[in-house]
Image (cartoon, helix red, strand yellow):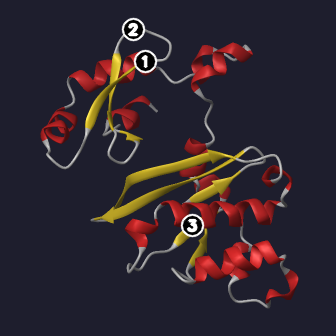
Amino acid sequence: MVDASDKALGGVLQQNIEGVWHPISFFSRKLSETESRYSAFGRELLAIYSAIRHFRHILEGRQFFILTDHKPLTYALKTSTDRYSPREIRHLDFVSQFTADIRHVSGKDNVVADALSRLGVNAFRQGLPASTLIDFAQIAAKQQNDIQLQELKDSTVMNFQEIPLPSSPGTIWCDMLLYISITPSILVKLL
């Protein structure tokens, strides 16, 4: 699932296990000044292109589909290329080498996009209410007793490191092998 705004883009790689979607890895980045001026279609396509490039080592040779809240992208690979810019044609060509299955998910059902666009750690500096902030101290406290996290830390496949909290004492355990924060069932309970 991918999403883009006029400031950033992101995606999440998920796997369906017994009817439940589980996040595997996250990707996001800030748009350059030039990219932020792309059309909505161009930014959403860039999100798909960038996510596939980022997750390429995982996606190659596998069947997968892309979820987006930008409906025109669901038809983009089936229409004539004369309506697209050369950059968009290159991006569509790259995407088509991996999948032609782009599906629409309505905005209200796009919970991943909502999570990807949540306020950052420094939102308090902008005078926003405390209820909109991520409580890293609470996450760190929950990690102390999380059995699933303890099992993952014992795994030889993962590379866990304690990362200092940005705004309070304490640390959060993160898997540095994939460069994503490990947040097993903790965030579900907090959100």
Query: Which residue corresponds to mark 1?
Result: 165
The image shows residue 70 at horizontal and vertical percentages of 71, 65
Q: Is residue 23 visible?
A: yes
Give the Cα distance between marks 2 and 1: 6 Å
Q: Marks 2 and 1: CB-CB under 8 Å?
A: yes
Give the Cα distance between marks 1 and 3: 32 Å
Mark identifier at residue 67: 3
Report the mark closest to the observer, 2 or 3: 2
Q: Residues within 10 Å of mark 1 (few under 14, many from 20)?
A: some
Q: 48 above or below 127?
A: below
Residue type at mark 3: give it: Leu
Residue found 41% across the figure and 76% down from its top: 60
Report the mark closest to the observer, 1 or 3: 1
Residue type at mark 2: give it: Pro
Mark identifier at residue 169: 2
| 46 with respect to 13 (left or right) | right
